Image (cartoon, grey):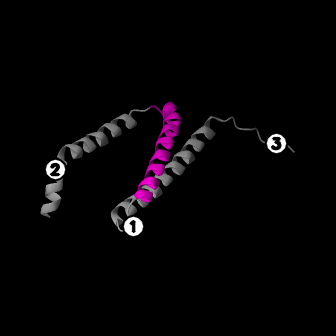
């Protein structure tokens, strides 16, 4: 328990920055108009593609006995992939809304 408290006190500024980034991200994303949602999702998909590549690199350079790095890298690959696929699904559904509907064929 003492080591956790020492780590928190040593990294206090980084923890504050992460918390601030979370609140700023929620505010920014919450104020995006729906018209800009599709381009924003494409950018997010590109960023998460970079996250996946970075996680693969981290896993490749990790020591074989460093289970924390391997597990975190594996989780980053899985969650990043889910985010990319989900983003493409949402973007595809939004683009379908803008397509003109075909009239039904008469016999």
Q: Mark 1 to mark 2: distance in Å?
A: 28 Å
Which numbered marker is on residue 64? 1
Residue 15 lies, in percent from the top left, at: 23, 46
Q: Residues within 10 Å of mark 1 (few under 14, many from 20)?
A: few
Q: Mark 1 to mark 3: distance in Å?
A: 62 Å
Q: Earlier in the sequence, mark 2 or mark 3?
A: 2
Label 3 belongs to which residue?
105
Could you tell me which residue is drawn at 84 percent across and 42 percent down?
106
Residue 56 lies, in percent from the top left, at: 46, 55
Q: Quadrant of the N terminus?
A: bottom left
Residue 83 lies, in percent from the top left, at: 48, 50
Could you tell me which residue is drawn at 26 percent across and 40 percent down?
20
Residue sitting nearer the eye, 36 or 107: 36
Task: Tell me which segment is drawn in magenta.
Answer: 33-61
Q: Is residue 53 magenta?
A: yes
Q: Are the residues flagged by discs 2 and 3 in contact, CB closer than 8 Å?
A: no
In the figure, residue 95 lies in which quadrant? Answer: top right
Q: Is residue 22 magenta?
A: no
Which numbered marker is on residue 10? 2
């Amino acid at each position: 328990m003492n080591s956790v408290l020492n780590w928190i006190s040593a990294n206090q500024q980084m923890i504050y920055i992460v918390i601030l980034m979370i609140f700023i991200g929620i505010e920014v994303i919450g104020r995006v108009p729906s018209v800009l949602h599709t381009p924003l999702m494409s950018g997010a998909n590109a960023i998460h593609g970079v996250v996946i590549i970075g996680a693969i690199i981290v896993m490749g350079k990790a020591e074989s006995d460093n289970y924390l790095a391997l597990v975190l890298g594996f989780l980053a690959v899985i969650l990043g992939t889910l985010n990319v696929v989900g983003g493409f699904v949402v973007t595809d559904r939004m683009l379908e809304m803008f397509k003109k509907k075909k009239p039904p064929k008469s016999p």
